[in-house]
């Protein structure tokens, strides 16, 4: 083996902090195993279903599709128009009625392979257009945020998200980090359903964050992977509307993985809110160069499903009902689990009730997580991130008992 050979590299890379756990879960032969790790929706039986609206869209596509020709670099124009309508829809407005800022030409939208592709493209744009910038992420955050910044070669720093007790947002720490950042730096915020804490700012807190961002000339990147799983599809975009109201530039990384349960189809979108229409058009050209050098053109099938659903009033209404049902089940599991934890004598866990979306942190350390996995076949992510969607009426008492024993 020559020194320059690929195989000469002797040490292995670490396994992925989320999908590595999923792999370990899959390999676990114990039938009683419980997967509360990866952020995917599950039904009572632990299965991640194909939504009925998706099945209907696929049935139609099978009958009508005529080609597998490349999509345009930035995605099919019909799809990106519909995704724009979904991301920027205002309360009470009919689907497709865009707010003036979007109609003004300041906003461009591109289809990306999933939310990860959208975050990657956002970070690529930071690297190209703000080469001195540092990207700030909350501590904790989704582990892929810093990993993507590393992969693109953009320095990153962290700022606290919660107070030391992990129960409430530390707004002062967030706004102080913004004030201390260099103008031109970027901050990745979770547009809704903070991953992993589930702790979202209130409307007033978002206002304070957006004001601080605008005053300092910071670029907010909104990771909007969980649109619809917090309070609702339109409600969850309140954070975005708060940033829009300041007039600042924004990058929004959206995803159809969770709200359409299209995890393996890789449908996401990057929305670029630029200073004005000419700037948006220019940034779009850079985005297309970055895409061409990465995935070249977006995958077709998943985007066609989303376009079929969003473009048809009846199918879209059916899908919106399915999003509501997923959200209600997750929230119901959250409430039932917290009640079961309290019933098992866990010390104050009421803060878990106010969390939004799939996740909260149970505040467990690595040794406790290993014990849960090894002794009880319960799989959680670092710091005890729990995915409430993975619970069921049968699993709630089992997990609550095991976790309460650690939280007493
Ligand atoms: C998660 O946080 O578990 C999900 O977003 C899946 C992923 O890509 O990490």
Image: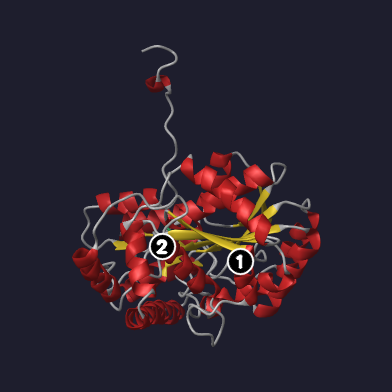
| Viewer-closest of 5 and 66 | 66
Circle 1: element type: loop
Image coordinates for residue 51, horizontal then vertical, percent: 29, 72
Crowd class of label 2 (few under 14; some 14 to 19; many from 20; radius 10 Å): many
Crowd class of label 1 (few under 14; some 14 to 19; many from 20; radius 10 Å): some
Name the quarter showing ligand 1: bottom left
Q: In which quarter of the image is residue 261?
A: bottom left
Q: Is residue 72 above or below residue 162?
A: above
Visual colour scheme? secondary structure
Q: Quadrant of residue 37?
A: bottom left
Q: Mark 2 points at which residue?
A: 39
* Mark 2 within 8 Å of ligand 1, using the beta carbon: yes
For the residues carrying marks 1 and 2, which lies nearer the camera in this image? 2
Image coordinates for residue 279, horizontal then vertical, percent: 67, 56
Q: Can residue 190 be seen by looking at this rendering?
A: yes
285 left or right of 57? Answer: right
Q: Is residue 143 above or below residue 197?
A: above
* Mark 1 within 8 Å of ligand 1, using the beta carbon: no
Furthest-top residue in view?
Answer: 2
Q: Which residue shows up at 64% across the image and 76% down it?
A: 100
Q: Distance between the residues labelled 1 and 2?
A: 20 Å
Q: Mark 1 points at which residue?
A: 166
Circle 2: element type: loop
| Viewer-closest of 408 and 290 | 290
Q: Which residue shows up at 36% across the image and 52% down it?
A: 299
First reached walking from the N terminus: tag 1 or tag 2: 2
């Amino acid at each position: 083996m020559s020194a320059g050979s690929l195989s000469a590299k002797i040490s292995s890379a670490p396994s992925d902090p989320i999908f590595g756990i999923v792999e370990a879960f899959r390999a676990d032969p114990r039938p009683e195993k419980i997967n509360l790790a990866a952020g995917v929706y599950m039904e009572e039986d632990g299965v991640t279903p194909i939504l009925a609206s998706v099945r209907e869209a696929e049935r139609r596509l099978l009958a009508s599709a005529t080609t597998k020709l490349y999509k345009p670099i930035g995605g099919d124009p019909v799809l990106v128009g519909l995704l724009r309508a979904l991301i920027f829809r205002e309360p009470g407005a009919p689907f497709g009625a865009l707010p003036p800022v979007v109609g003004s030409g300041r906003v461009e939208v591109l289809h990306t392979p999933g939310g990860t592709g959208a975050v990657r493209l956002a970070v690529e744009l930071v690297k190209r257009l703000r080469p001195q910038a540092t990207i700030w992420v909350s501590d904790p955050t989704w582990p892929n945020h810093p990993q993507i910044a590393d992969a693109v070669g953009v320095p990153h720093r962290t700022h606290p998200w919660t107070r030391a007790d992990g129960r409430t947002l530390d707004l002062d720490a967030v706004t102080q980090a913004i004030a201390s950042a260099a103008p031109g730096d970027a901050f990745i915020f979770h547009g809704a359903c903070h991953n992993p804490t589930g702790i979202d700012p209130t409307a007033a807190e978002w206002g304070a964050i957006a004001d601080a961002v605008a005053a300092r000339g910071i670029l907010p990147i909104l990771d909007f992977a969980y649109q619809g799983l917090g309070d609702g599809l339109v409600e969850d975009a309140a954070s975005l509307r708060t940033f829009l109201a300041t007039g600042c530039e924004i990058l929004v990384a959206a995803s159809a993985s969770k709200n359409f349960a299209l995890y393996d189809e890789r449908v996401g979108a990057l929305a670029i809110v630029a200073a004005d229409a000419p700037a948006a058009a220019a940034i779009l050209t850079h985005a297309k160069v970055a895409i061409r050098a990465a995935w070249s053109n977006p995958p077709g099938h998943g985007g066609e499903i989303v376009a079929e659903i969003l473009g048809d009033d009846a199918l879209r209404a059916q899908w919106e009902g399915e999003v509501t049902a997923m959200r209600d089940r997750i929230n119901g599991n959250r409430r039932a689990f917290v009640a079961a934890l309290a019933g098992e004598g866990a010390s104050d866990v009421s803060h878990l009730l106010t969390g939004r979306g799939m996740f909260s942190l149970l505040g467990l350390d690595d040794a406790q997580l290993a014990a849960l996995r090894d002794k009880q076949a319960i799989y959680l992510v670092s710091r005890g991130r729990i995915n409430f969607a993975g619970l069921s009426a049968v699993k709630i008492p089992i997990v609550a008992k095991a976790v309460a024993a650690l939280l007493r």
